[in-house]
Image (cartoon, rainbow, N blue to C red):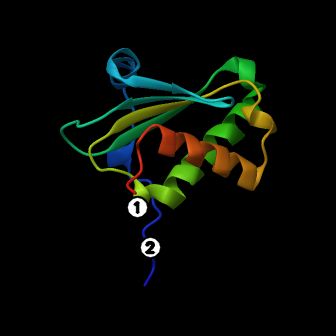
Amino acid sequence: MSVDESFPKSERLTKKSEFEEIYGRGTRYSHRFFTLFVMDNVEGPRKIGFTVGKRVGIAVVRNRVKRLMRETYRRNRSRFKSNIRAVVVGRPGCGELRGEEFSKELAELFRTGGMTVG
C-alpha cells in the first residue's frame, strides 16, 4: 500500500490576498534559513505556500529552493495538521543547503511552528 505523496492544487496558496492574510494575521517563526508564517484553526482545507526572495540567489537557485520546499512538504504531508494555513519564506543561505540537510532544517521549523501532529 503506497502513501499519497502528492501536493494537490486544493492545498496550495495561489492568490496574493491569501499570502497577505497569513503574513498579517499569522504567527511568525524565524529560523536561520527560513521564516514560517502560520495561521492555526482555520476553516477549510489545509493550505501552504512557498516564496523565495531575490536575495537568496539567481532564478535557478530560487527555483531549486522552492522545489525542495515543496518536496519536503509533500513527503511529510501526512504528518501535518488539517486546519492550518502557512507560508514558508526562504532566507539568504538556504540555497546553499543540500538534500537531506535542507529537509532536516525545514522539518525542524515545521515542528517548531506547531504544524505537525505528534
Q: Secondary structure at mark 1?
A: helix
Of circles 1 and 2, which is in front? Answer: 1
Q: Residues within 10 Å of mark 2 (few under 14, many from 20)?
A: few
Q: Residues within 10 Å of mark 1 (few under 14, many from 20)?
A: some
The residue shown at (76%, 35%) is 95
Q: Earlier in the sequence, mark 1 or mark 2?
A: 2
Q: Residue furthest bottom?
A: 1
Residue 42, horizontal then vertical, whole percent: 23, 36
The residue shown at (65%, 44%) is 105
Quadrant containing the C terminus in the rendered view: bottom left
Residue 84, horizontal then vertical, whole percent: 32, 40
Q: Which residue is mark 2?
A: 3
Q: CA distance from mark 1 to mark 2?
A: 8 Å
Query: With respect to residue 53, does 107 lie above or below?
Result: below
Q: Secondary structure at mark 2?
A: loop
The residue shown at (44%, 54%) is 7
Quadrant containing the N terminus in the rendered view: bottom left
Residues under numbered marks 1 and 2 in contact, where contact means CB atoms less than 8 Å apart: yes
Query: With respect to residue 81, does 84 lie above or below?
Result: above
Rendered image: mark on residue 62 = none
Horizontal placement of 3 versus 30: left or right? left
Q: Residue furthest top?
A: 24
The part of the image, by quadrant, that contains residue 39 is top left
Mark 1 residue type = Ser
The residue shown at (41%, 39%) is 48
Query: With respect to residue 110, does 8 lie above or below?
Result: below
Residue situated in front as seen by the camera: 44 or 79: 79
Q: Which residue is mark 1?
A: 78
Residue 19, horizontal then vertical, whole percent: 40, 23
Horizontal placement of 65 versus 48: left or right? right
Mark 2 residue type = Val
Horizontal placement of 115 versus 58: left or right? left
